[in-house]
């Protein structure tokens, strides 16, 4: 028995969650004495009203696509990778090492090298929690949280120590050489006298992110590996019966997940900062959780949700600039999205299922399936 | 390193361990009842802000603490509704709560005090002040000249705020509640097998909400301690990962009250030492990276989690929403 | 005239659109044992869960001792003097017996006085009803028979006058079941009222005074046990005459397909679950493994299916199989011509959220016929193959896109059987092929198994249903406590002899002392209960 039509599951549930989050955010804005409607208009104007706004929105979205995909891929194996923050930070280290210590003739080659460096470093950071989960049964949520803090301390150590150029006061690496600078949207889309995306950080990495979405979709839904990951996620005993090894699935899934989180670094470290700075991830790893939940762990959904959060980030910055509403409002919105789409999913879903159940009495289903529902 | 320096380190160990201990015990109640709580950090943060804000407004630290507990309880209620009533994912709910607190505290404090996400400095009765025990000396000069026993008494035992002593008393209290009372038996049972509790005619939902509420109260005290005892006011993100360290300590302690005291004291000690790099070098003869000390609680916990040193077995029904089944 | 201890009037309960109980009325007189019998899924457990306040009935009334009683929760049921022993025990594993008994029935806010009172009362109860247990033992350390006693004691400690037992003998050996029945007789003598839910006719005939029959959520009859017979009850249960005999020609065994030599399995806790068994299966024969659940049969299937490690030797078509490898070797087993219908289709055999077509590929998803190219799978080829198999096995509805959870138990099992049999394996492992399957599907599945045998394939059948073993098998081996107690031909044995073997008693005399047997049984069963 289908409790809800597929479109309701895919569109309506996230949409209602989003509306609830928006409503509460509006109440918060009202409570601090601002006008929510004006705030929304400011956000839309600032984030979507110009190529400048879009340049930032898509830059943020690129970060969130990677971290969102990281959470989504892991979730298909029912692994909750909360360590995107640390994996992305290590990805930054990978990018920095590749850009600083290998003389690249052209940005395109540097991009390939940095992609590899970011993915490998991110994956390596996910590998230890994955191994401990697979072999020792250590809860991956706890270990990945611990690894976020260990990563922060590790990078802190590197950036005030070995990687800091002598004489510099900044906890950061030296600037990357010019041959590694990635083309920005301004470089790519301005023509003649018309300058678009002026001064914005959006860059070619956005297309890498879109390609990552397509690739993840293919892997999860069209390959044997993806089939095995999903089977394992749905039922571990069944996967065991079918000869799908848990160690292999946990390891490969987390390596992919960590690699995707690490890839974020080619956008923010290589594409934007052009050096590795302290705390470069700025919470994008955690936003990946909201993005994956909102996008229902589907790459296309993740892309849309990432753009939505890109909009919120850029809009929130504009809001802080023009009003007294601090930037942290977007953290509140993010929290509410996670709360409603993730933890309070049933609150949204149960009334909807009841409504759809009443609208269409389906042909008499068998009772076993109905009974297995609540426990599933 | 001299005796007095050691006493000073141990003194700050106690002060730094107190919020960890309170949060760790909060997590202990919640997780013993089968509700994972990674929202300790957020609850502490919310409590820190509201206790500081209300303590400043009212001029009374105790009133402030009540407000902090209230704020923490609201977040506990959110966690309870999400993970008990609607059987949502407890981990995701915890993550959401942490962000909610991180964002709301800044948004509200900016609107309330307009000081860039902090509260004004607290002073006088707006803070919890040290309690000087009878016979203890206070002035640094007097302490330095006192005999070792007096130094120990004055430096280490006397001179903490009341919340420190309260936190220490909660450890035996928690042990007693868990293992010597009806409530404790039921609480432990509901974290191991809620169906057993349900069929015995006891409300699973009620017990779990009670546990989550206790966790809220303890996080509230922890937050109030941070903002109105350890520091003199709220600053943005002032919990600085303490909720997660408490979580690590809880695993380290294998969900037991006395072990929790030991684990949080150990982690508090690491924090205290990290504040005195000069003393490490002086004692060990070589330089220890502060970052390593920062990371050590997490590294130790990962090692414990990996089961290389005594396996930590969590309550069996932990993290699972309870669904009635025959 | 005394009022009935329990009277249910017009109870109805629906789960979504599924009507689990339809207008059920029943009267149970005090001091009697009343049986409720019906097939799996007939609604027996739902009805009793309503009586125990676990579910709320949509309509109907409950009367206890002549008084209309509302039972909104278990607390109210306990207050009304009702105790329940669930099929899956509700005990806290790492608590002691005493703590489990006291839980929820403490005298005061402090624990110690309650515990010492419980200790005294437990002693009295133990003497009164043959219910001795060690109050300080931890639940996880005692066997399943003991755990059941703790459940009964829990109910009695709460002052239950009405005791409901849901499928209490499912995990017990015949000997343990007999002991349980003696306990129940003793309780009845003391004036307690007992409701026994079961799907086993033997138990109903042996112990009950009256019996109600349920079918598809409805109460089809209530009769005095002395005035009925098993044939009549069986007919009432299924709605028509049961034909459990399978039409099959005598076997014509060919070459030896599978040789098992001195197989040992030790589980993760270090308990030896299979203690050195050896047997052969030849082409064209069905070897049935009989036994009470939890005596090593599941492990045997897991080893041969490639997801449990073992010591010893297994030859498939004369070639050795690697037993020491990983616990996820199912794929290599399939390549060697071993197909496996697992015991629990919902847990292992199917991914309930996957569509039927995805499930038909399950375990065979690396089949070359299912691939488009080196990288991608050919989903349309799998769908087409699924449609074919669904038609051949008459799976309803024949919709490859429907999720597995939306098929009935029988149709789910047909999907699994189709997937495995259509691979044309040399050896088919079948565990509990008809558990929770409707009669029509049972006959169909049995026919398919026999047809595969007639094609000259070897079949290993594991079932706890003795009738199924006896009607399908060409040879029967009985497992007890990780050993094969004996092998029999179905034509030369009967249920009584097999029952003795299942309890560990061989015809050369008792293999073990009785006490030891009971202990072993309890232990073996205890592990079985954990697996469920």
Image (tube, coloured by chain):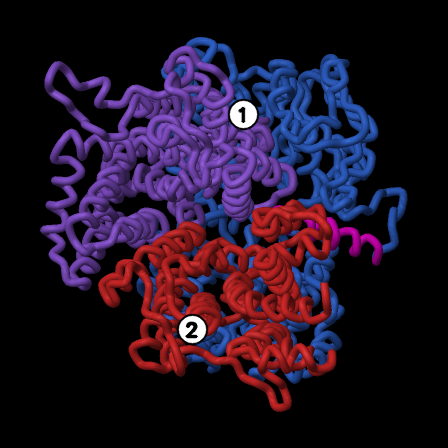
**Residue at the location (33% across, 39% down)?**
A291
Residue A228 sits inside the magenta stretch:
no
Q: Residue at 66% x, 27% y: name it.
A: C306
Q: Residue C194, relative to residue C114: is it above or below?
A: above
Q: Name the residue under label 2.
A: B228
CA gap between label 1 and label 2 equals 78 Å
What x and y, as percent, mark residue A14? 26, 43
Which residue is more in the foreground, A242 or A288?
A288
Q: Name the residue under label 1.
A: C447
Report the front residue among C179 and A124.
Answer: A124
Q: Give the range drawn in magenta.
A: C515-532
Chain C on-screen colour: blue
Q: Is the magenta stretch mostly helix, strand or loop?
A: helix
The chain painted red is B
Camera-side mark, 1 or 2: 2
Crowding near the residue tagged with mark 1, few <14, some 14–19, many ≥20 C-alpha atoms within 10 Å = some
Relative image position of residue B74 (x, y in whole percent)? 35, 67
Q: Please give the letter of the chain rendered in purple.
A: A
Residue pushed farthest bottom? Answer: B134
Q: In which quarter of the image is the C terminus of chain A?
A: top left
Q: Is residue C63 above or below residue C23?
A: below
In the rendered structure, the answer to whether residue C322 lies left or right of residue C357 reads right
């Amino acid at each position: 028995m289908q409790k809800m039509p597929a479109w309701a599951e895919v569109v309506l549930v996230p949409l209602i969650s989003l509306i609830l989050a928006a409503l509460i955010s509006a109440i918060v804005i009202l409570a601090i004495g601002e006008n929510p409607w004006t705030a929304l208009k400011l956000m839309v104007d600032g984030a979507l009203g110009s190529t400048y706004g879009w340049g930032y929105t898509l830059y943020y979205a690129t970060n969130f696509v990677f971290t969102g995909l990281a959470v989504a891929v892991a979730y298909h194996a029912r692994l909750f990778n909360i360590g995107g923050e640390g994996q992305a930070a290590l990805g930054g280290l990978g990018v920095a090492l590749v850009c600083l210590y290998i003389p690249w003739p052209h940005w395109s080659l540097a991009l390939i090298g940095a992609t590899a460096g970011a993915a490998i470093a991110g994956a390596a950071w996910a590998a230890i929690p994955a191994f401990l989960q697979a072999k020792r049964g250590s809860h991956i949520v706890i270990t990945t949280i611990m690894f976020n803090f260990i990563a922060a301390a590790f990078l802190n150590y590197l950036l005030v120590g070995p990687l800091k150029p002598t004489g510099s006061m900044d906890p950061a690496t030296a600037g990357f050489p010019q041959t590694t600078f990635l083309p920005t949207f301004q470089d790519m889309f301005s023509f003649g006298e018309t300058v678009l995306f002026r001064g914005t950080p959006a860059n070619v990495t956005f297309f890498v992110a879109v390609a990552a979405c397509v690739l993840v979709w293919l892997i999860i839904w069209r390959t044997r590996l993806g089939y095995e990951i999903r089977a394992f996620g749905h039922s571990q005993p069944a996967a065991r019966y079918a000869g799908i090894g848990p160690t292999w699935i946990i390891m490969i899934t987390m390596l992919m997940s960590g690699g995707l989180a690490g890839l974020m670094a080619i956008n923010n470290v290589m594409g934007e900062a052009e050096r590795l700075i302290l705390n470069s991830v700025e919470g994008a790893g955690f936003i990946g959780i909201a993005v994956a939940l909102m996008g229902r762990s589907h790459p296309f959904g993740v892309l849309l949700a990432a753009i939505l959060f890109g909009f919120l980030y850029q809009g929130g910055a504009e809001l802080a600039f023009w009003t007294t509403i601090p930037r942290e409002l977007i953290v509140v919105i993010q929290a509410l999205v996670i709360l409603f789409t993730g933890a309070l999913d049933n609150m949204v879903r149960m009334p909807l299922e009841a409504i759809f159940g009443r609208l269409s009495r389906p042909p008499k289903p068998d009772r076993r399936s109905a009974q297995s529902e609540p426990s599933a | 390193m001299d005796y007095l320096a050691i006493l000073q380190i141990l003194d700050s160990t106690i002060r730094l361990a107190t919020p960890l201990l309170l949060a760790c015990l909060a997590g202990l109640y919640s997780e013993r009842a089968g509700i994972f709580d990674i929202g300790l950090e957020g609850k502490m943060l919310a409590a820190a802000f509201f206790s500081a804000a209300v303590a400043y407004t009212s001029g009374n630290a105790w009133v402030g603490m009540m407000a902090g507990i209230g704020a923490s309880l609201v977040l506990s209620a959110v966690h309870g509704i999400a993970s008990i009533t609607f059987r949502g994912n407890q981990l995701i709910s915890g993550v959401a709560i942490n962000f909610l607190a991180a964002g709301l505290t800044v948004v509200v404090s900016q609107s309330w005090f307009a000081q860039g996400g902090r509260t004004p400095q607290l002073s006088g009765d707006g803070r919890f002040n040290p309690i000087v025990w009878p016979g203890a000396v206070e002035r640094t000069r007097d302490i330095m000249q006192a005999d070792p026993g007096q130094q120990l008494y004055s430096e280490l035992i006397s001179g903490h705020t009341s919340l420190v002593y309260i936190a220490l008393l909660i450890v035996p209290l928690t042990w007693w509640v868990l293992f010597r009372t009806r409530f404790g038996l039921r609480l432990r049972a509901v974290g191991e097998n809620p169906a057993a509790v349900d069929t015995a005619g006891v409300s699973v939902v009620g017990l779990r909400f009670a546990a989550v509420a206790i966790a809220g109260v303890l996080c509230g005290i922890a937050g109030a301690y941070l903002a109105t005892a350890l520091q003199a006011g709220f600053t943005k993100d002032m919990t600085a990962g303490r909720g997660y360290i408490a979580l690590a300590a809880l695993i380290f302690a294998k969900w037991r009250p006395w072990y929790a005291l030991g684990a949080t004291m150990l982690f508090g000690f690491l924090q205290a030492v990290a504040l005195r790099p000069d003393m490490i070098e002086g004692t060990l003869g070589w330089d220890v990276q502060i970052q390593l000390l920062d990371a050590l609680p997490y590294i130790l916990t990962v090692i414990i989690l990996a089961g290389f040193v005594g396996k930590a077995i969590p309550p069996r029904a932990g993290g699972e929403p309870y669904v009635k089944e025959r | 005239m005394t009022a009935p201890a329990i009277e249910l009037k017009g109870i109805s309960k629906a789960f979504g659109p599924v009507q689990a109980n339809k207008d059920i009325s029943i009267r149970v007189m005090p001091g009697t044992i009343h049986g409720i019998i019906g097939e799996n899924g007939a609604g027996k457990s739902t009805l009793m869960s309503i009586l125990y306040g676990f579910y709320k009935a949509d309509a109907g009334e409950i009367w206890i001792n002549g008084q209309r009683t509302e039972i909104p929760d278990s607390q109210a049921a306990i207050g009304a003097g009702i105790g329940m022993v669930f099929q899956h025990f509700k005990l806290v594993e790492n608590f002691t017996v005493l703590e489990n008994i006291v839980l929820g029935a403490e005298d005061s806010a402090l624990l110690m006085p309650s515990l010492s009172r419980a200790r005294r009362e437990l002693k009295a109860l133990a003497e009164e009803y043959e219910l001795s247990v060690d109050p300080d033992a931890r639940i996880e350390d005692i066997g399943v028979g003991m755990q059941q006693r703790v459940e009964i004691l829990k109910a009695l400690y709460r002052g239950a006058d009405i005791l409901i037992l849901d499928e209490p003998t499912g995990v017990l050996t015949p000997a343990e079941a007999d002991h349980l029945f003696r306990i129940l007789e003793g309780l009845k003598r003391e004036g307690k009222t007992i409701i026994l839910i079961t799907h086993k006719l033997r138990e109903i005939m042996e112990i009950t005074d009256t019996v109600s029959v349920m079918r598809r959520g409805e109460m089809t009859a209530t009769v005095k046990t002395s005035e009925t017979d098993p044939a009549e009850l069986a007919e009432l249960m299924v709605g028509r005459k049961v034909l459990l005999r399978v039409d099959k020609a005598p076997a014509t065994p060919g070459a030896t397909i599978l040789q098992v030599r001195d197989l040992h399995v030790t589980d993760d806790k270090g308990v030896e679950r299979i203690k050195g068994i050896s047997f052969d299966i030849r082409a064209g024969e069905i070897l049935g493994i009989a036994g009470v659940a939890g005596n090593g049969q599941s492990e045997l299937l897991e080893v041969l299916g490639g997801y449990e490690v073992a010591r010893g030797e297994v030859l498939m078509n004369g070639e050795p199989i690697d037993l020491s490898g990983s616990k996820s070797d199912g794929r290599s087993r399939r390549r060697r011509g071993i197909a496996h219908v697992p015991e629990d289709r919902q847990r292992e055999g199917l991914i309930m959220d996957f569509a039927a077509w995805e499930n038909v590929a399950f375990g065979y998803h690396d089949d070359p016929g299912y691939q488009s190219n080196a990288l991608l799978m050919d989903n349309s080829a799998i769908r087409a193959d699924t449609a074919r198999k669904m038609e051949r096995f008459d799976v309803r509805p024949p919709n490859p896109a429907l999720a597995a959870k939306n098929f009935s138990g029988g149709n789910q099992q047909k999907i699994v059987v189709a997937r495995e049999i259509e691979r044309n394996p040399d050896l088919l492992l079948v565990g509990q092929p008809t558990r929770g399957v409707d009669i029509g599907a049972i006959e169909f599945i049995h026919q398919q198994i026999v047809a595969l045998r007639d094609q000259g394939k070897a079949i290993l059948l594991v079932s706890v249903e003795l009738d199924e073993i006896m009607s399908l098998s060409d040879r029967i081996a009985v497992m007890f406590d990780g050993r094969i107690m004996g092998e029999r031909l179905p034509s030369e044995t009967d249920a009584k002899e097999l029952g003795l073997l299942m309890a560990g008693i061989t015809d050369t005399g008792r293999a073990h002392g009785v006490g030891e047997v009971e202990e072993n049984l309890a232990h073996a069963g205890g592990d079985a209960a954990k697996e469920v």
